[in-house]
Image (cartoon, rainbow, N blue to C red):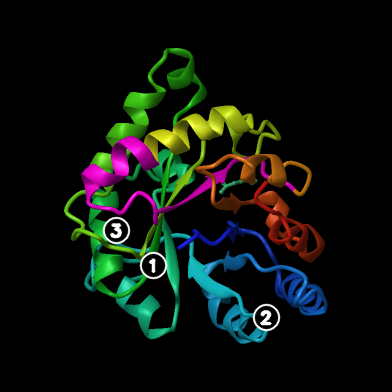
Amino acid sequence: MARPITIVGNWKMNQSIPEIKAFFAGLKQAQGSYSSQAWVAPQFIHIPLVQTLATECGIKVGSQNCAGHEKGAYTGEVSPVALKEMGVNFTIIGHSERRSLYKETDAELNEKVLLALKQGLTVIFCVGETLEQREKGQMKDVITHQMKEGLKNIPNGFERVLVAYEPVWAIGTGKTATPEQAEEVHDLIRNKLAGGLGFNPDQLIILYGGSVKPSNINQLLAQKDIDGALVGGASLKAADFVALCQGKKG
Ligand code: PGA
């Protein structure tokens, strides 16, 4: 089965309630104009509002993070159990901002992944190298390490995992990886790493992230191992998000 094109909006700490309402009003008008899977991850507190607006548009709603514990004395954290109870579909885990600003380690990320999967959530697991690591020729080792540590002990053949390759130097910088640079890493993930971690390489959906916009989505999707995008800045406005969802493979 062909892998569906998947466009995921990572809204980060953006979008006011009026902006969210305007986003979905715009999306409703564009309904039927694209066939990609379209998902969004708002701030936790906006999830219920976004769910009511998103269902009419056939959009799945997720969180940008989740705790690595089911319950207990973890002030300020949000449990994957609570996310599941609230009808959340997916969670992003291991975004580079979580790794760098909040010092989340590979081991913690693996706990989060396993717990989120246990609760029935789909996981978008992010990996990516810094500019310094790329310039030192460490890109392959960094991606391999992040994949092997973050996604270990997942039962074989598991399907509720997507991987997002997001080079840290391309996030929010306007500097997209070239389609060839991105494809090199997607090929590594699909054809060298996924099988060893128990995934079916042909079915694993791998997203690219880092300054994706309507003007570069088609070049990225033209690469054989790029199945969609995890998008920050260009996912905030309905018109851009719709244009991304209208992207086509080759
Ligand atoms: P950007 O962010 O599209 O604004 O570069 C991508 C991300 O951080 O997921």
Q: Which residue is mark 1?
A: 122
Residue 160 rendering spot, x and y as whole percentages = 35, 65
Q: Quadrant of residue 122?
A: bottom left
Element carrying mark 3 = helix
Which x, y percent locates residue 44? Answer: 50, 70
Q: Which residue is mark 2?
A: 57
Residue position marked by numbered label 3 in the rendering: 113
191 left or right of 10?
left
Where is 40 relative to 99, above or below?
below
Dot placed on the residue nearer the N-terminal end, 3 or 2: 2
Looking at the picture, how far across and down is residue 64, in whole percent? 48, 60
Residue 191: within the magenta?
Answer: yes
In this view, which residue lies farthest toward the top? 136
Q: Which residues are magenta?
A: 190-213
Q: Residue at x 24, y 65 (%)?
A: 115
The furthest residue to the front: 1
Q: Could you tell me the amino acid type at mark 2?
A: Cys
Few, some or many C-alpha atoms within 10 Å of disc 1 (few <14, some 14-19, many ≥20)? many
Query: Which of pointers 1 and 2 lies earlier in the amino acid sequence?
Result: 2
The residue located at (33%, 66%) in the rendering is 75
Pointer 1 with pointer 2, Cβ within 8 A: no
- Quarter of the image with the N terminus is bottom left
Q: CA distance from mark 1 to mark 2?
A: 20 Å
